[in-house]
Amino acid sequence: MKISYDKIQDLVDAAAAKSLQIRRDLHQNPELSEHEVHTSARVRAELKQLGIPYRSEIAGHGIKAVLTIKSKEPAVAIRADMDALPIQEKVELPFKSQNDGVMHACGHDIHTAVLLGTASVLKALQEELPRTSVFLFEPAEETRGGAKPMIEEGCLEDPRVDTVIGLHIEPSVDVGKLEFMPGCMNAASTMFTVTVKGKSCHGASPFTGIDPLLPACDMVGSLQSIITRHIHPVDAALITVGSFHSGTAGNIIPDETVFSGIIRVLDMQLRDSIKSQLRELFENIARAYGASCVVDYQDSYPTLINNQELLDSVSEICREKLGDKNILLNPKSSLGADDFAYFCHAAKGLYFNLGCHTPGTPEEALHSAILNPDENCIRIGILSEVLAVLKIMGVEIE
């Protein structure tokens, strides 16, 4: 089965123009995890207009759309996340966020718009496709993670899916380029919360109480000893504390201090070892101060490991059609975490980065209040997803 590349590009151009408007609507109306009401409604409206049947309210506001082809072969799925972040946008755009304190600072508006564009192109090619396509719009990636509950609710069944692909914008990569990362792409992570319990008293009489701030500060300062003295130097691991709270007034020694952070590793077994060491360290420090502590863990996402066969075949077709200079291979894993990892554990998975940096401008990080992705990446995103799906399905592109 063959499809003309010129035909594909024409369809992508038309889809990209529509996806640009969708992206701006979603950017202007960002919604936090588990509150993706407007976003879900817009996705459903676009799918209805395309004539692609869907099932909604999966794992919250998640959506599964199916472009059915009569075939015994398993389906190919493409995933996009939909939720935004609790960040006050500082970029002055005509379509700046209208929701105070909420911003699409991780590109999920682009991911969703790109996937709708991909669905539009594949719908136009439906009669020429040998396998079914599934489009997964995932909620709550930034918090509890929508991938695992969507899988548990059957998003990879009926039809059976054996391959899942997805992309993520990357502001360190110039627009027009794609970045592929072989092997382990993203880290496994575990959130932790530590409650240090002391005894409240007057600030003028600290000897009558037990100050929880002292052991808590010691705990935070001692954390890095786990990384530098108890883990092999070549093993990638990171522990970050991002929240620390205690007390209500400057002249009162509080009865407890609470801080929280995250563990990131590329080896799942190493995560268990760090959790054990961290708990032992904190309990010993608390005991030395006459205090006590409670350590709570919440395991987040597993490691995201790309399927090498998929990576080789998809990067090959993208290199052939987009040019060798626009395809980057990055052997360095990221300690960031993404729940696309669950799809990689449930099926053959491939996740890659979509360059969104405008050359000649400062690079802004993901989750930044001044992130402003180059919207030209939308067309490249649609084209790369379409090329990937056709390659996986065995369609020859002339």
Image (spheres, rainbow, N blue to C red):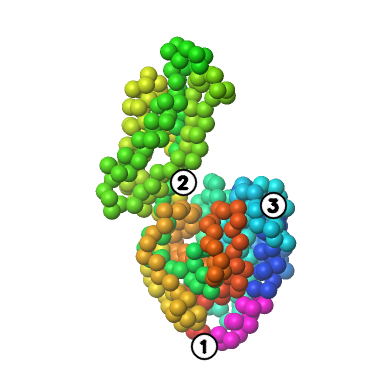
How far apart are labels 3 and 1 at the CA level? Answer: 41 Å
Q: Which residues are magenta?
A: 2-15
Q: Residue at x 48, y 34 (%)?
A: 259
Q: Which residue is mark 2?
A: 300
304 in the magenta segment: no
Q: Secondary structure at mark 3?
A: helix
Q: Is residue 146 visible?
A: no
Q: Secondary structure at mark 2?
A: loop
Q: Are marks 3 and 2 in contact (CB under 8 Å)?
A: no
Mark 2 crowdedness (10 Å alpha carbons): few <14, some 14-19, many ≥20: some
Say whether disc 1 or disc 2 marks the residue closer to the N-terminus: 2
Q: Residue at x 49, y 57 (%)?
A: 340
Q: Which residue is mark 1?
A: 398
**Can you tell which mark lies on residue 37?**
3
Left or right: residue 316 compared with residue 367:
left
x and y percentages locating residue 93 in the rendered image: 70, 61
Q: Nearer the viewer, residue 228 or 317?
A: 228
166 in relation to 34, above or below: below
Q: Secondary structure at mark 1?
A: loop
x and y percentages locating residue 220 in the rendered image: 41, 35
Mark 1 crowdedness (10 Å alpha carbons): few <14, some 14-19, many ≥20: few
Left or right: residue 108 compared with residue 240:
right
14 in the magenta segment: yes
The residue type indicated by label 2 comes to Ser
Q: Residue at x 32, y 39 (%)?
A: 225
